[in-house]
Amino acid sequence: MADTLLVWLVIGAAALVTYGLRISGLLLAGRLPKSGRFKTFMDALPGTILLSLIIPAAVAAGPIGWLATLATGLCSCKTGNVFLSMVVGVAIVALGRWWGI
């Protein structure tokens, strides 16, 4: 019984911390600087987070992963179509795995 209660307390505490962070972000967003170095930093943040997710996966996939990443980036830059870019990247990885690369 005590173990079950402890589990529920930990889950509740984790939920409170998670939603507390989300709410504080919303409440503080209006007080953040709208210009200068901080704005530049915040504008670059989504790209850096995206790269931190993509690069480890590309490295783990090997040469075919790097090729797919490069082709996806080029396709996205040329066409601006995110869906088409994802299809190109997935197709390259799928073909590479099918060929045993």
Image (cartoon, helix red, strand yellow):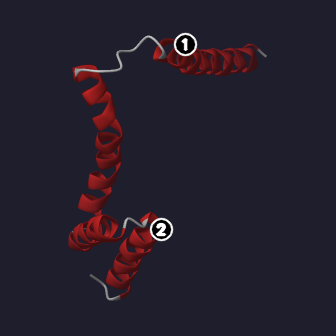
Question: Looking at the picture, does residue 16 appear above or below residue 70?
Answer: above
Element under disc 1: helix
Q: Which mark is residue 27?
A: 1
On screen, residue 26 versus residue 35, left or right, reads: right
* Residue type beneath disc 2: Phe
Hey, which quadrant is residue 38 in on the image?
top left
How many marks on residues? 2
Please state which of residues 14 and 77 is positioned toward the viewer in this rendering: 77
Q: Residue at x 61, y 20 (%)?
A: 19
> Which residue is painted at 26% across and 28% down in the image?
41
Q: Position of residue 28 (x, y in %)?
A: 48, 12
Q: Residue at x 35, y 76 (%)?
A: 93
Q: Identify the residue at image location x=34%, y=79%.
A: 92
Q: Nearer the viewer, residue 60 or 83?
A: 83
| Image quarter (top left, top right, bottom left or bottom right) of the C terminus | bottom left
User: Disc 2 marks which residue?
Assistant: 83
| Residue 4, position as x, y percentages in the image | 74, 20
Q: Quadrant of the N terminus?
A: top right
Of mark 1 and mark 2, the one earlier in the sequence is 1
Classify mark 2: helix, strand or loop: helix
- Between 3 and 68, the one nearer to me in the picture: 68
